[in-house]
Amino acid sequence: MKIQLKEIKIKEVSKGYINDNEEGVVGYSSKLNIRPKYQREFVYKDKQRDAVIETVKKNFPLNVMYWVKNEDNTYEVLDGQQRTISICEYVDGKFSLNSLYFHNLTNVEQDAILDYKLMVYFCEGNDKEKLDWFKTINIAGEKLTEQELRNAIYTGTWLTDAKKHFSKTGCAAYNMGNDYMTGIAIRQDYLETTISWLSENKIEDYMSKNQHEPNANELWLYFQNVINWIKVIFPNYRREMKGVAFGILYNKYKSEKFDSKKLEKEITELMQDEDVTKKSGIYEYVLTRNEKYLSIRAFTDKQKRESYERQKGICVKCKKKFELIEMEADHITPWVKGGKTISANCQMLCKNDNRIKSAV
């Protein structure tokens, strides 16, 4: 890859600046693509954005930026998007600093900002070289997520349409599924989660296969089906539902018939069960019947010691004597049959017998 360092004035970069949510962000007399498709949305907080402008006004150096030169003599911002947008938005009068907009400044102050020189590395190379370089320099600032890096590799018509549904502030996926999803849409969390569900965690394979498809209708319809299924099966919303891997449950149980009223009654009881330490796992449990999702409260060391002394160190299954460290606590009456995690319901088994019992 060919790399050349140049000084570019802010007046040149901000000339012809346009920030369009649908079409993208351009500057440098329309020759610079400030936010290529593989880049993230603007994620700087006001404090970070203001710090960039303060740095420029004080004529302190900003970190070096990287642009990629294309064959048609246009450019793409490889690194420095957040700083570039911050600068251009300020010059364009989109926000103020210390209650002063750019147009409130004196001509001398305005000229000082416009004549500020940005240090920019111009990079030329093929797609693989550009993407490798992109990953290499992604070590500071707002570090890219795994999904943002995937977007850099599999950019295309499919991704553009997918981001419209899943990756914008207030996007359709957010409006429909925010109660059930964790993460931030503009950091690609909704997109990553949904692809993971649909592809059974083969995200790269799915994006590679669909890279040049005209739209992401399959993914969007799948997401809507998952959310609608949740609302039918679990109509009574609780905050514990946020972050549950509902897509995985949908894939396995979407064709089964459930009585939502019976499920709700059981969920209500489990929510009140003090032995259930992971309330969010209740939703997975009532469908799978796997107790691991509930993180059933374990017996305390005191309860184990009481049972061990009561049994005189004898395993109730094999009738052999063991040291306490060689034994494990077990519910006499299983939790699923109403047994509680209390001293009276605790028995000590040797590790072998306890594991045999657990496997049954």
Image (tube, grey):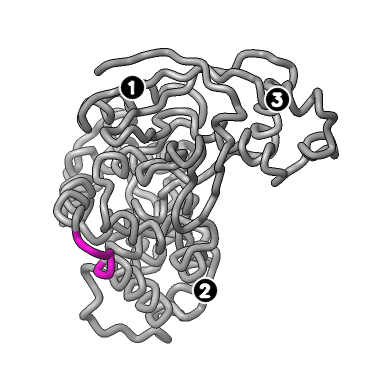
Give the mark toward the camera: 1 or 2: 1
| Callout 1 crowding tier (Cα within 10 Å): few <14, some 14–19, many ≥20 | many
Q: Nearer the viewer, residue 343 or 105?
A: 105
The residue lying at 70 percent from left, 25 percent from top is 113
Residue behind mark 3:
113
Q: Report helix, strand or loop for mark 1.
A: strand
Q: Quarter of the image containing the N terminus?
A: top left
Dot 3 or dot 1, earlier in sequence: 3
The image position of residue 112, as x and y in percent, is 73, 21
Q: Nearer the viewer, residue 326 or 248?
A: 248
Picture disc at residue 123: 1
> Mark 2 is on which residue type?
Tyr
Cα distance in 3D space between marks 1 and 2: 51 Å
Residue behind mark 2:
237
Residue 40 sits in quarter:
top left
The image position of residue 128, as x and y in percent, is 20, 30
The magenta-colored residue range is 213-218
The residue lying at 33 percent from left, 32 percent from top is 73
The residue lying at 24 percent from left, 25 percent from top is 125
Dot 1 or dot 2, earlier in sequence: 1
> Mark 3 is on which residue type?
Ile
> Mark 1 is on which residue type?
Cys
The residue lying at 24 percent from left, 61 percent from top is 198
